[in-house]
Amino acid sequence: MNRRNFLSFAGGLVAISIMPIDLSAKDYRKLKPDVWTAHTIDEATKALYGVREIIETDKIKIKVPKINSSGAKVPVTFETSIDAKTVALFQDANPESAVAVFNVGPYDVKKYGAKIKMAKDGILMVLVEGTDGNIYMAKAATKVAAGGCEG
Amino acid sequence: MANKISAIKVKIKNGVATVRMAISHPMLTYAQAEAKTGSREDSNFITHITGKVGDETVLDVSTSQFLSKNPIFLFLFKCDTFKIGRKLSGRELDNGAKRKDSEIGDFLTIIATDRKGNTYKKSVELASRKK
């Protein structure tokens, strides 16, 4: 057997044996690196969930001010009552669109909040991957008086 | 200013813990790093936050550069299976009362990792005044 081939094969085995320990904490930056470099919400969605039908729902609630004086700190809170595997927050104002991907565990109440940056007016989108395999989505628009991404 | 998790506050009500945390971190985006130092590689931001009580994971989030500078973060989790400590009342504190060992609750540990590989860790006790 070629030595080089053998080495890569052994590396694969190690990776497989390590995986079950890592399952409790999922780092989506390593699992799905394309999500974080995608420039539009569509691209990021495809990178994260693949090509799947997206259902718009009112079971996801996003709370964000209509107008923000500064884009450096836009307070967002969102919650959902859907049985979820993952929850993702995207926006379309910044050069890249992904903000956060949550891995939902058994203890999660599925309510999160954060302060985020917005370079200009834009749309916030929360996507939820349900345990039933469907993708759910809700949008909220917000306006920004002064951009908070470049300064 | 040194980067750190500067504060974690936990409020417990009806078996649900509301956690607010503040992290001191510049959260430099690629564009900001380029404007400041001329290199996109100097960008530095929190990439992952994990919350743990004992061995159980209560928060697991991968984040990007678009959290604000010195981000504030909120999440809720069900805590009725964890041990909740008893907070001393003001009167007990004034009298110098000490808690029994059985009244100390489980600890919530937040671990944040940034792009340069630094990790920040802080623990806070799950405690409430009422049972």
Image (spheres, coloured by chain):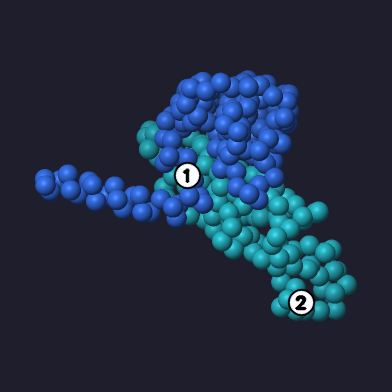
Chain colours: A blue, B cyan
Residue positioned 46% across, 32% down in the render: A36
Instruction: Tell me whether circle 2 and circle 1 mark residues in contact (CB < 8 Å).
Output: no
> Which quadrant is the C terminus of chain A positioned in?
top right
Please state which of residues A71 and B46 is positioned toward the viewer in this rendering.
B46
Res A75 → quadrant: top right
Of badges 2 and 1, nearer the viewer stands 1
Q: Secondary structure at mark 2?
A: loop
Is B85 on the left or on the right of A18, as rendered?
right
Residue positioned 51% across, 36% down in the render: B65
Residue B92 at x, y percent in the picture: 85, 74
Res A139 → quadrant: top right
Please state which of residues B116 and A132 is positioned toward the viewer in this rendering.
A132
- Subunit of label 2: B
Q: Which residue position is annotated with label 1?
A: A27
Q: Which residue reaches farthest front? A: A132
Is A25 on the left or on the right of A19, as rendered?
right
Residue positioned 73% across, 58% down in the render: B80
Q: Which residue reaches farthest right? A: B91
Q: Secondary structure at mark 1?
A: loop
Residue A20 at x, y percent in the picture: 44, 52
